[in-house]
Image (spheres, rainbow, N blue to C red):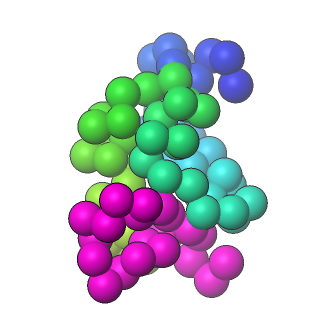
Amino acid sequence: MENLGKRVFKPAVIKEIIRGLCKLGPLTNLELAKILGRNPKHIKDQYLYEMVKNKELEYTHPENTAHPQQAYKAKGH
């Protein structure tokens, strides 16, 4: 995981890693960014928004997407 902050992975690989992590349990944007060694805004803008839109991930608080404890989980988990 130490190399994840470096630009060695294609976006599809990062998405697969995010999906796998979110299968283990809900994770916030900040938690994912820390694990991946990336900027939280970058993770949210480049991956999470699209993955929710494509139904790869789900919000833990879908009624309020700006919920302070918003986290992401793999679809069906």
Q: Main secondary structure of the magenta part?
A: loop
Residue sitting at 47 percent across and 35 percent down?
33
- Between 43 and 62, the one lying in front of the other is 62
The quadrant holding residue 22 is bottom right
x and y, in percent, of residue 2 in the image: 67, 17
Percent coordinates x, y for residue 42 in the rendering: 30, 35
User: Horizontal and vertical percent for residue 36?
Assistant: 55, 31
The location of residue 71, given as percent across then percent down, is: 48, 61
Residue at the (41%, 63%) spot, across then down: 70
Please check the rendered image and state whether residue 73 is part of the magenta-colored stretch, yes or no: yes
Q: Residue furthest front?
A: 68
- 2 displayed left or right of 28: right
- Residue at the image point whose x is 70% and y is 25% from the top: 1
Q: Quadrant of the C terminus?
A: bottom right
Asked if residue 27 lies left or right of residue 67, the reply is: right
Q: Is residue 64 left or right of residue 39?
A: left
Q: Is residue 11 above or below residue 53?
A: above
The residue segment tinted magenta is 57-77
Q: Kindly identify the residue that appears in the image at 68 percent across and 63 percent down.
A: 25
